[in-house]
Amino acid sequence: MAGKDGMKVISDSRSFDEVIKTVYGNSVSAAGRQKVSGGDINEAFIIRLSDGKKVFLKENTKENLDFFSAEVEGLAAIATTKTLCVPEVYSYGTYADRSFLLMECLEQGRMSKRFWETFGYALADMHEADTAVLLSEKKYGFTKDNYIGAGFQKNMVKDSWIEFFRDCRIMPQLDRAREALFPEDIRQIERLMDHLDKYLIEPPHPSLLHGDLWSGNFMVGPDGEAWLIDPAVYVGCAEADIAMTELFGGFSGEFYASYRESGLIQYGYEDRRDIYNLYHMLNHLNLFGGSYLYAVKRIIDRF
């Protein structure tokens, strides 16, 4: 079955060779497979085809097809903004006992002279793009639930950003983390959520977010500019994406200077940043264990 723009959705193909022939025609076959780093969730490979082309393949168990369908939806949502590039998806689906995602193999480029400045402007443009093509006007959430890493991400549509962040971001993570947290930590987070409107503000408009925007989730593409990968998209407050960029060392100062020209970062952001990143620290605690407990406690003790 063909998907958007000719992308093929394949169900229960007998083999990977059959997948390749379905996508590229009977004259093309897989001539080589090189395993590469694909993160903590999937196996990843560069596939060399018999016609000389290279493609990028992710695989998982058949039961985890949702990871890939969510990624396809996320990349497509970013592409609708016509602001930042994302790799093209050729096919996804299942074969034998595997699920797979077959996509463009990006050649690593060299940063353009104004890479960080251009990246900041482009991300601001993405955050300013009209989200009505995805959700009803002035709504927060997404068309379907998805994942941030291996963590399930709830995307129920809400009228309020503060309500969405509480009910679909912090509280689901807190529910998963209860056994890892001390009772007082749980009470502190619950009290913070009860008075969240004292700390967060409603943004001037909803923005499409990458959702997991750290240095590992963009690449320098063949054009020398930033390409986004591995999205955890939803419609939310632009500041939440920027907060994530600062969590693990931050981006270049040129990136933030150009982004700030958009006016999307509002007064008091530095006080809100830790609350946005509490979501990511709880997610890391749930995925990777107690080494992230201190980071969670540092945030909630502040508030």
Image (cartoon, helix red, strand yellow):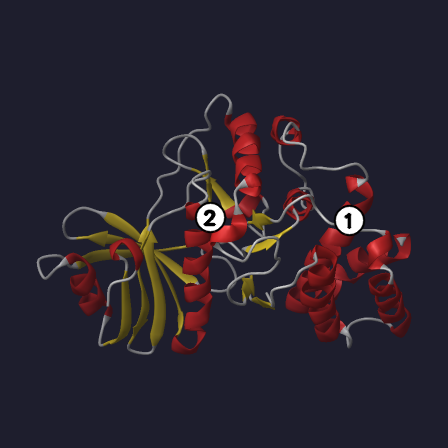
Residue drawn at the location 28% of the way across and 51% of the way down: 55
On screen, residue 179 above or below 131: below
Q: Residue furthest front?
A: 137
Residue drawn at the location 18% of the way across and 69% of the way down: 18
Type of amino acid under label 1: Ile
Q: Position of residue 65 (x, y in %)?
A: 41, 71
The answer to whether any part of residue 291 appears in the image is yes
Mark drawn on residue 49: none
Q: Secondary structure at mark 1?
A: loop
Q: Quadrant of residue 160?
A: bottom right
Cβ atoms at labels 2 and 1 below 8 Å apart:
no
Distance between the Cα atoms at labels 2 and 1? 25 Å
Q: Secondary structure at mark 2?
A: helix
Q: Position of residue 204 (x, y in %)?
A: 68, 43
Mark drawn on residue 78: 2
On screen, residue 221 above or below 92: above
Position of 260 with respect to 83 (left or right) is right
Position of 233 with respect to 48 (left or right) is right
On screen, residue 83 above or below 145: above
On screen, residue 264 above or below 46: above
Q: Nearer the viewer, residue 115 or 72?
A: 72
Q: Nearer the viewer, residue 237 or 71?
A: 237
Q: Quadrant of residue 296?
A: bottom right
Label 1: which residue?
201
